[in-house]
Image (cartoon, grey):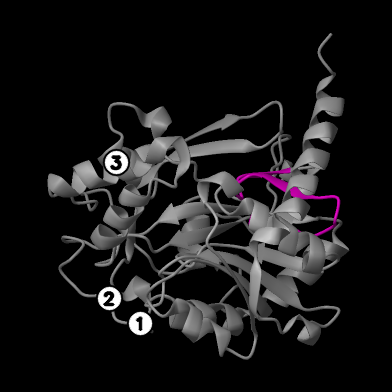
Amino acid sequence: MPLPARLRRRAERQWLIARAINRRRALTPVSDRTDQIRKRDILAFVTQRNERVRLPYFLEYYRNLGVRHFLFVDNASTDGSTEYLKVQPDVSLWQTRASYKQSRFGMDWLGWLLFRYGHNHWCLTVDPDEFLIYPHCDTRPLTALTDWLSDSGHRSFPAMLLDMYPKGNLDDETYREGQNPFEIACWFDPANYSIRKNNYLGNLWVQGGPRTRAFFPYNPQSGPALNKIPLVRWNRRFTYYSSTHMLLPRSLNQVFDEDGGEMASGCLLHAKFLSTFAKKSTEELDRGQHYGNSQEYRAYHAGLQQGVRLWCSESRRFRDWRQLEDLGLISSGNWP
């Protein structure tokens, strides 16, 4: 007789946590500064490979928001990323040559670090091309948001992945190290998104936007998931179930209001589509380490071969978080 859903989810959660603890053996410390972490620090957890050109702006952005310590896993970079990260005073760095695919696409590695260092901290789990935007982010630090979430009894905060892109060809303007990527990739789709509910885990599943429009036009359900829950008041009993799309326990995924109201939410501005994209896509396609036999990167490669452009007549130029709230892409909820 099948287990009830509640017991099945509990068993899955315990198995994923145990798996992450076991996979700690794949990680070799390069620079461990975790003794610097203080009780109320907001922590960022990141897996990266060959993202050297992105790292200076990424670190600057999140330092300015209020992240106090970064915990990186480097997956066998060859571009100087390791050397750059290991001398950053607020970065702890681990390295591994293990399979990204066989580590649940890096989530086993980060799961161990979250278990070991994230307990009772607000933890932000993002990629080097993801930049959190939330209501009032231009005037309020991330601690203002996390303090309000804690006081309101919320343990997690959602952010839809919003793909950003340039108006012309991706290689028309070269992205320079340390540059704000949104000086180039400053356009986005204001609509063209589909939402459905995952009843088993209780999260919303969001798809659409320029990647589905340009790379999966004939099979939109194969497009990438855009729903993320990147910011969590972590506990050792928690685990990410599938990337940062959803978590266990199930209650952490209930970050929306089904009774007609609105709960606070943000966006992750996604700076994937820069001049670096073609080279990165070819590298990742050759490695074959991504979900679904790298079908997403196969679609990117085919689109690039055909000279695809992401800009269209409905594209909007990004202005600020208020614009995203007016479009219904983020919400202040009842945050005063």
Q: Position of residue 300 (x, y in %)?
A: 27, 46
Task: From the viewer's side, name the closer residue of 286 and 53.
Answer: 286
Q: Quadrant of residue 27?
A: bottom right
User: Please, which residue is most extreme toward the left here?
Assistant: 306
Quadrant (top left, top right, bottom left, bottom right) of the N terminus: top right
Residue 175 — which label? 2
Give the amino acid type for the residue marked by disc 2 in the picture: Tyr
Does label 3 or label 1 sit earlier along the sequence?
1
Label 2 and label 3: CA atoms lie apart by 23 Å
Q: Which residue is mark 1?
A: 179
- Judge whether residue 238 is colored magenta: yes
Would you name the residue on which mark 3 appears?
298
| In-image side of 248 versus 64 (left or right) | right
Please say if 154 is above or below 130: above
The image shows residue 154 at horizontal and vertical percentages of 81, 55
Figure quadrant of the C terminus: bottom right
At 70% from the left and 54% from the top, the residue drawn is 23
- The residue at the point 38 percent across, 84 percent down is 178
Disc 3 secondary structure class? helix
Q: Does 45 appear above or below 157?
A: below
Q: Tell me the magenta residue range.
A: 229-247
State the image coordinates of residue 287 (x, y, percent, origin top left). 37, 51
Q: Amino acid at mark 3?
A: Arg
Q: Secondary structure at mark 2?
A: loop
